[in-house]
Amino acid sequence: MTGGHRRILVVEDDPETAGQLVDSLTTSGYQVDLAANGNEALSRGGASDYAVITIDRMLPDIDGIAVMRQLRDDGIAAPVLIISALGEVDDRVRGLRAGGDDYLVKPFSFVELLARVEALGRRSDTIVKETILRVGDLAIDLMSRTASRCGKEILLFPREFQLLEYLVRNQGRVVSRAMLLQHVWDLHFDPSTNIIDVYVGRVRRKVDGQQAYPLIHTVRGVGYCLRAPG
Amino acid sequence: MLLAKTLTSSTFKQALIAIGTFGMIVSALFSYVYLSTSSYVRSRSDRGIMTEYSSLQGAYERSGRDGLIALLEQRIADKSFAGNVYLLVDPSLAILGGNLRAWPSAATAASGWAEFRASEPLGNATNRPLVRAMLQIFPGGDRLLVGRDIGDLDSFADQIKTAMISAAALLFVVAGVASILVTRRTVGRIEQINATSRAIMLSGLDKRIPLRGTNDEWDRVAENLNLMLDRIETLMGEVKQVGDNVAHDLRTPLTRMRGRLEKAYHGQRVGEDDQSLIGDTIADLDAVLRIFSSITRIAQIETQARKGAFRTVDLVEIAGEVVELYDAAAEQDGTRLTVVGDRKVLVTGDRDLIFDAIANLVDNAIKHGRAGGEVVVANEIQDGRPVISIADDGPGIPADQREHVFKRFYRLEHNRYTPGNGLGLSLVAAVARLHGARIEMLDNAPGLKLKLWFSAPDG
């Protein structure tokens, strides 16, 4: 993501939550505007060019989904992250169908929020066109679906490759367990076990075992991050 | 009270409408029968009169006035002609023969049909008969009247009329009484159901509507309502159980958090301690939130609101994905996790929910099965129904506890302190209920074999 385009519009009516959102996004280097209700969101959203817009599902004046629809009708293409206390899948589907790009259920951890905002911001940035992605001495070939370190091939099951690919595409960024479930397994629920950790553990043994340095790092309480040292 | 309810009940009103309609039809039918019978009887009598007239006329033509007079006398004396009325007069209306004492004034000039009341009784009868007669003037000027006492005919018609009216009246009375009795019975049954409902609202869910053992539709209704009550009672029991368990499962981490924060509040700030304290608190909080979202998820599934997302899905495919997801976890436990069975087993359902349910079952099988054991997921079509079974070779579940494991927060005593919140199987049960699937638990000797019987897919 380029430094010039790190402006985010936060639409949230609860002052304390809004303050926390603004704080954590600002700390991560974003420039944050805050709208406390739907009408303010519409006027601000139309006025500037935002990298990402986060919208609370339930606002005092206009429903969050209606705000998002209006913004889309006004030609605002910025990716929208819907934040809601209504967590169930149906509601999520409704939100995404109405033009939302991602969905986060309250309560959430700010690291999770940042991870998702980062991923959304990148989506509006660039689309990777290369067929071979590299991180340090790791190379993954998107065409032949193979991975190697220092030229030595790593044997991966298709799903393991998908997981590694998702980590590589988001290299340097934190990826939460929920995001992995969503993007690698297309699952929108929390299996409430450490199943993802076990799965990532196996991929990690294959990728990082007996290598000069580890690539996959655990981010405590959130998920994982793939990055080269230095 | 009951009578008032009977009279105002809708069944009774319907019965009245039915009786009214039926009564109208019966009246119309009876009137038709009455009219056609009386006109038939009358036309028969008219034909008789005409036949008699022509035979007398023949006698007059053959043997003249005296011959006819003789014949008339013979007729009047003959018992088989009783009820017949004859009169022969000359042109001046002087009586020549017959049993009538005077030419009827109403028919002085006329010829043809006449109906009149005779001026005097006939023979030794006491009342003046009503006569219907045919009269004609012969070419010589003599007049002949041949008729019949139609009082008898009228009384016959009256008898028919009376019989029909009393039959109709009896019919109405019987129908009315029958409908009151039937309605009373219906109202009585409904009253029973109402009374039970009121008793339940007042005192509790332990009452049931009594069955009469007649196996009729009322018993069916009562049975279904009783089943509904059973289900509500179970749910209420579960809610209470959940309340107790929620209290335990939520209070434990909340108490830990509170204690930790309180200690930190009164104690010295130490960077490293604070860090781990906050980390632990967040982890506990997450556990609490997870329990909450599981509860709301189950609640939402149980409201059946998700049937909109139903489509045809392949159990084999879903099972394959679940096994793939849990492959690593099984490997870590040294458990062999395999999927076997048919190549394609289609069901109508919600993919995410079925995935969730199977994932929970596989998770349980790995967790509670034997370490280093085997977990087999099998998909097949059995008796035309799609079935998925998950079998482990662990300690299994004692037969008497199988019922309970689907209750929210239920955990076998020895599992009380293993990870998990006891909501997994109640989620499975909720998903199964939403899909109309039956859960069967079998002894895998050793271990548990859990089967989910789906219904055959639509279309």
Image (cartoon, coloured by chain):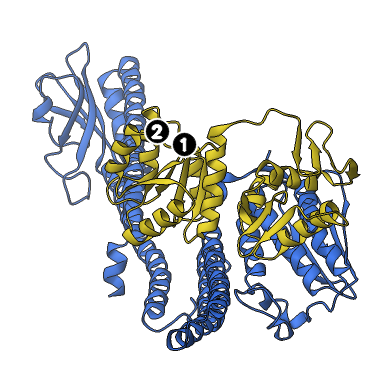
Q: In which quadrant of the rendered view does residue B130 lie? A: top left
Do the residues at pointers 1 and 2 share their chain? yes
Residue B359 horizontal/vertical position (percent): 72, 59
User: Quick one: label 2, few (<14), some, or many (20+) residues within 10 Å?
Assistant: some
Say which residue appears at 90% left-offset and 75% top-offset: B445
Residue B450 horizontal/vertical position (percent): 78, 66
Say whether residue B126 is left or right of residue B75. left
Q: Earlier in the sequence, mark 1 or mark 2?
A: 1
**Visible in this render: residue B382?**
no
Say which residue appears at 48% left-offset and 88% top-offset: B263
Q: Which chain is blue?
A: B
Q: Nearer the viewer, residue B374 or B387?
A: B374
User: Quick one: label 1, few (<14), some, or many (20+) residues within 10 Å?
Assistant: some
Say which residue appears at 13% left-offset and 30% top-offset: B103
Q: Amino acid at mark 2?
A: Asp
Label 2 chain ID: A
Give above or below for B234 relative to B340: below
Q: Amino acid at mark 1?
A: His
Determine the colour of chain A: yellow
> Which SS class for mark 1?
loop
Position of the C terminus of chain B, as image quadrant, is top right
- From the image, tell me which residue sits under label 2: A49
Number of marks drawn: 2
Give above or below for B424 relative to B121: below
Q: Nearer the viewer, residue B427 or B212?
A: B427
Residue B64 horizontal/vertical position (percent): 28, 18
Give above or below for B222 relative to A9: below
Q: In which quadrant of the rendered view does residue A1 lie? A: top right
- From the image, tell me which residue sits under label 1: A5
Position of the N terminus of chain B, as image quadrant, is bottom left
